[in-house]
């Protein structure tokens, strides 16, 4: 019996080691990943006093960053530029490379334009809008854009009160078998919906207390902060000589949540456990209303694709991240509004009256 | 519930756990219940046509058995056989072919100027109906011929038909082989379990890593509105490997699962792409169907008896093609294979002379050439099989013959990359003459564990997007 147990143990170890070796060789040959060091999305991160940002020349799986840490080709000094500011929806989370909306927008705008322009995607996964505003002067000085397209990920505001102050880069993560992450992914992809929702609800229950009392709506101070950040972003952009463009935030659900889509609302809530599910759509509407109001008051070009984006899994891979097709529709909507702009000289978008 | 689903991953261990804790009789009843659950998980209504067909087959077989025991003549048994055959074919015809005939009749009448409103039933095709109908038919025909005794247990017969590993996509098990395995206690040996696990691993590898990764490539080309010679060639290469790995992968998993429970299923594929002529191909491809067609259609039609041999071949192949689906391209595919079988019979003596190259090197070269040529003939057959319309067949055939020819090296490399494990392994199997090469019996157990773990990696993490098994639709 003991011999059998020993044998089973040996086989288990051998299986584990082989799987891990296969994963490492696979990463090495497919992505040029290191064989021995950790290989996860932290590879993309560099740190400064504002938190984590894109690490120059980093590449992880399908994501490649340039010398500035942007998901972009190197800047072409000859071309006028549009700078996109946002979070993972802008960075491109689920789309295949080249299909993220800023890249598609670049292709659409350049289609019939004799003088080409370059879109600079400064969006970075996990970057909150307040952090983007903090980094804006530096980015404006580097990129010298003719216009800046702001696509803020509004849900991040929910977590702002709980983000600890920056205390330097985190210590290197302990070595973790790569197989674990792979198994997690496969499990998430293949587990039945009811099981995933149940697990998410358990996680929400566990995490909610650290996020304070449960709320039905995003709080007024956070809405005010968002408004201030928008106005600050507009001021900074104009001060650099560029034109700001505000974009309303789109999500998978549209105006109401279809019953078969409620599980995705729970998935969204997992990241912001103290806001009840029904509060998310109200939050999106409230924040988009703020964006519209600020754009009107500040005489900024507003692009409002949120109400027109078709909902559902065909266009969104999760609650807010686009699929290739979703990014295409989104980019088309932006291109339609920006098509008439020249993006050169002092008055790139003549239809927008300046203060 | 498909073999490549999470539900099955939960279902199987539970079934095995309960199965091994029971005695023979209870094992059979439990397997029957599990099989009903497995089949009903697609749609519980599918169980009704199956129960109707098996009940009538059981009753007819029992009546014939009584007649045999009473020493009555073959002629007296015929009505029961006719009842069984007609019931099965009516059910198959109703679910699978009614809409096809109705639509085509409507088109024909309309073209003749007769105005009738179209009538289709729009019923859902019960999954695996073609497979279990043929399986049940083989039982009554064998009893009629006196080749087997009818079972006195309806539940045993029902298990023979319903047994979940082979129910939806075969192999089409004959009653003379499966029924004794149901009625007699089964033994599960370590060798059987090892062989079963090997088949399951290899089957999943073929299905998930090879077939599912090639599916998008083949689909992309076959969904294109225009045809190009190079792309058509890549499309048929991708589809040829995809359909083989998809179907033989399923069969291997089915055979492996059966082995785990002490059953033994027949071999369904024997390196079909190493065939040098159509006759060899049909002795190696979907063997359970081709041997069924031979025994229950070709031979009763007259078989090799001079005079009707070509007609019998053509009829068998056209019906075999139509068995795959209610569409003209399946008929055309059957006609194509019937034609090449006839052509091969006609020119076989000449071919034998032409390819009788002297010496061992000559033999290897001539065999290789024949394999390559016949593989491409088979591939053309797959074009007929996979195409969505006659116009696509025409445009792809024209493109193959006259171009234009553009080959995307990246796509060609992808096809080669995904096919290479199959090509390499089957080459070893072919040259060594050992189909069990992959059971790794020739290497120490620890290395075998490593090999299976590597297979698992490619199946779980490098598989293509899950696709349902192609043969489920038949």
Image (cartoon, coloured by chain):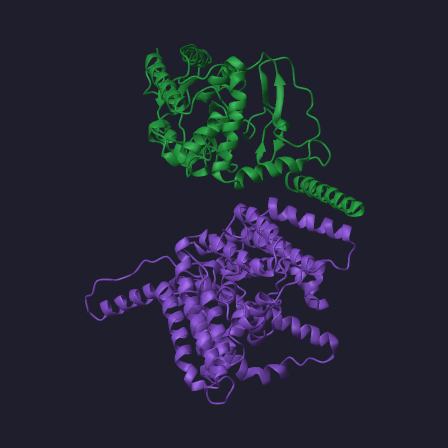
Chain colours: A green, B purple
User: Which picture quadrant has residue B259?
Assistant: bottom right
**Where residue B347 sits: x, y (%)?**
55, 83
User: Which picture quadrant has residue B434?
Assistant: bottom right
**Where residue A326 sits: x, y (%)?**
42, 35
Relative side of B432 to B417, left or right: right
- In the rendered image, the residue lying farthest to the bottom is B306
Q: Nearer the viewer, residue B333 or B245?
A: B245
Q: How many marks?
A: 0
Question: Is residue A262 placed above or below B324 in the rendered structure?
Answer: above
Relative side of A301 to B347, left or right: left
Q: Residue at x 75, y 43 (%)?
A: A9
| Quadrant placement of the C terminus of chain A | top left
**Where residue B267 sits: x, y (%)?**
60, 67
Q: Nearer the viewer, residue A7 or B113?
A: A7
Question: Is residue A30 placed above or below B181 in the rendered structure?
Answer: above
- In the rendered image, the residue lying farthest to the right is A3
Tell me if I can see residue A134 in this picture.
Answer: no
**Where residue B151 sits: x, y (%)?**
52, 71
Q: Nearer the viewer, residue B458 or B14?
A: B14
Tell me if I can see residue B346 in this picture.
Answer: yes
Q: Residue at x 35, y 31 (%)?
A: A336
Q: Residue at x 27, y 69 (%)?
A: B108
Relative side of B423 to B465, left or right: right
Question: Is residue B440 placed above or below A290 in the rendered structure?
Answer: below
């Amino acid at each position: 019996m003991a011999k059998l147990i020993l044998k089973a143990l040996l086989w288990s170890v051998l299986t584990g080691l082989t799987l891990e070796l296969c994963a490492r060789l696979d990463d090495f040959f497919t992505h040029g990943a290191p064989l021995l060091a950790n290989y996860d999305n932290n590879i993309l991160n560099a740190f400064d006093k504002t938190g984590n940002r894109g690490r120059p020349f980093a590449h992880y799986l399908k994501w490649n960053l340039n010398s500035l840490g942007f998901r972009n080709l190197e800047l072409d000094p000859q071309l006028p530029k549009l700078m996109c500011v946002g979070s993972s929806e802008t960075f491109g989370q689920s789309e295949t490379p080249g299909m993220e909306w800023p890249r598609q927008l670049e292709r659409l705008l350049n289609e019939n334009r004799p003088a080409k322009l370059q879109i600079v995607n400064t969006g970075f996964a996990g970057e909150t809008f307040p952090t983007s505003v903090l980094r804006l002067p530096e980015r404006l000085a580097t990129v010298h854009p003719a216009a800046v397209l702001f696509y803020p990920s509004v849900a991040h505001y929910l977590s702002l009160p709980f983000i600890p102050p920056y205390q330097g880069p985190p210590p290197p993560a302990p070595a973790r078998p790569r197989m674990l992450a792979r198994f997690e992914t496969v499990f998430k992809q293949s587990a039945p919906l009811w099981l995933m929702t149940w697990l998410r609800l358990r996680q929400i229950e566990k995490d909610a207390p650290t996020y304070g009392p449960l709320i039905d709506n995003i709080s007024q101070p956070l809405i005010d902060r968002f408004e201030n950040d928008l106005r600050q972003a507009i001021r900074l952009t104009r001060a650099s000589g560029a034109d700001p463009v505000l974009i309303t935030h789109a999500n998978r659900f549209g105006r109401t949540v279809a019953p078969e889509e409620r599980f995705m609302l729970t998935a969204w809530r997992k990241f912001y456990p103290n806001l009840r599910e029904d509060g998310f759509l109200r939050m999106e509407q409230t924040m988009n209303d703020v964006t519209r109001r600020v754009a009107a008051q500040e005489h900024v070009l507003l692009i409002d694709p949120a109400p027109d984006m078709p909902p559902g899994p065909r266009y969104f891979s999760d609650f807010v991240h686009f699929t290739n097709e979703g990014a295409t529709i989104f980019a088309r909507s932006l291109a339609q509004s920006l098509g008439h702009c020249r993006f050169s000289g002092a008055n790139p978008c003549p239809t927008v009256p300046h203060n | 519930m498909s073999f490549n689903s999470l539900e099955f991953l939960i279902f199987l261990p539970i079934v095995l756990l309960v199965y091994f804790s029971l005695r023979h009789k209870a094992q059979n009843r439990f397997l029957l219940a599990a099989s009903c659950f497995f089949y009903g998980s697609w749609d519980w209504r599918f169980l009704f046509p199956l129960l109707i067909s098996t009940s009538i087959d059981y009753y007819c077989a029992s009546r014939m058995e009584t007649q045999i025991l009473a020493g009555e003549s073959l002629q007296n048994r015929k009505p029961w056989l006719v009842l069984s055959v007609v019931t099965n074919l009516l059910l198959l015809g109703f679910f699978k072919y009614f809409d096809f005939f109705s639509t085509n009749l409507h088109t024909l009448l309309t073209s003749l100027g007769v105005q009738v409103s179209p009538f289709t039933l729009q019923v859902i095709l019960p999954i695996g109906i073609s497979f279990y109908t043929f399986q049940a038919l083989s039982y009554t025909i064998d009893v009629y011929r006196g080749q087997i005794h009818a079972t006195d247990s309806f539940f045993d017969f029902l298990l023979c038909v319903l047994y979940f590993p082979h129910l939806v996509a075969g192999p089409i098990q004959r009653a003379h082989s499966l029924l004794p395995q149901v009625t007699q206690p089964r033994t599960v040996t370590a060798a059987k379990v090892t062989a079963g696990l090997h088949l399951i691993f290899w089957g999943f590898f073929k299905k998930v890593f090879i077939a599912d990764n090639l599916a998008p490539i083949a689909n992309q080309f076959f969904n294109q509105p225009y045809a190009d010679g190079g792309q058509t060639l890549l499309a048929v290469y991708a589809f040829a490997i995809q359909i083989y790995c998809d179907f033989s992968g399923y069969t291997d998993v089915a055979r492996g699962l059966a082995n785990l429970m002490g059953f033994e299923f027949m071999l369904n594929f024997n390196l079909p792409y190493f065939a040098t002529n159509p006759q060899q191909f049909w002795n190696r491809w979907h063997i359970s169907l081709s041997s069924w067609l031979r025994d229950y259609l070709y031979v009763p039609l007259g078989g090799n008896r001079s005079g009707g041999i070509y007609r019998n071949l053509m009829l068998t192949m056209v019906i075999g093609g139509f068995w795959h689906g209610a569409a003209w391209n399946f008929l055309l595919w059957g006609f194509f294979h019937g034609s090449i079988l006839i052509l091969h019979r006609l020119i076989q003596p000449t071919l034998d002379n032409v390819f009788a190259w002297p010496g061992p090197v000559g033999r290897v070269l001539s065999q290789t050439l024949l394999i390559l040529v016949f593989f491409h003939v088979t591939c053309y057959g797959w074009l007929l099989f996979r195409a969505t319309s006659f116009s696509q067949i025409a445009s792809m055939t024209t493109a193959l013959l006259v171009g234009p020819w553009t080959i995307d090296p990246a796509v060609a490399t992808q096809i080669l990359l995904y096919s290479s494990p199959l090509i390499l392994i089957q080459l070893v199997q072919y040259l060594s003459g050992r189909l069990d090469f992959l059971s790794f019996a020739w290497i120490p157990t620890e290395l075998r564990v490593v090999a299976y773990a590597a297979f698992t990696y490619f199946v779980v993490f490098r598989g293509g997007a899950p696709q349902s098994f192609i043969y489920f639709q038949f």
